[in-house]
Image (tube, rainbow, N blue to C red):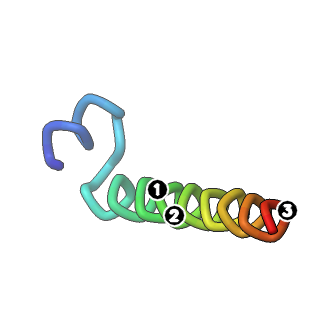
Amino acid sequence: MKAVSDMMGHEGILITLKTYTDASREFKNREIAVLKDYYENAI
């Protein structure tokens, strides 16, 4: 994670962790919505 933080030009590793953790949650929420929509329309 430190290497990624350095490559991205972040001042510290916490910025990198917060940035990618939030994106990960967003991604999971989008995927849950897609699956929910699929199953609701499949029945």
> Which numbered mark, 3 or 1, is in the foreground of this view?
3
Residue matched to label 2: 22
Q: Residues within 10 Å of mark 1 (few under 14, many from 20)?
A: few
Q: Residue at 65% of width from left, 62% of height from top? A: 35
N-terminal-most mark, 2 or 3 = 2
Residues under labels 3 and 1: Cα distance? 33 Å
> Which numbered mark, 2 or 1, is in the foreground of this view?
2
Give the image location of residue 4, x and y in percent: 23, 38
Q: Are the residues at dot 2 and dot 1 in contact (C-beta closer than 8 Å)?
A: yes
Q: Secondary structure at mark 3?
A: helix
- Nearest the viewer among 31 and 1 is 31
Q: Residue at 56% of width from left, 55% of height from top? A: 27
Work out which quarter of the rendered image holds the C terminus and state it.
bottom right
Relative horizontal placement of residue 9, taking residue 38 as reference (left or right):
left
Residue matched to label 1: 19
Q: Secondary structure at mark 1?
A: helix
Q: Quadrant of residue 29?
A: bottom right
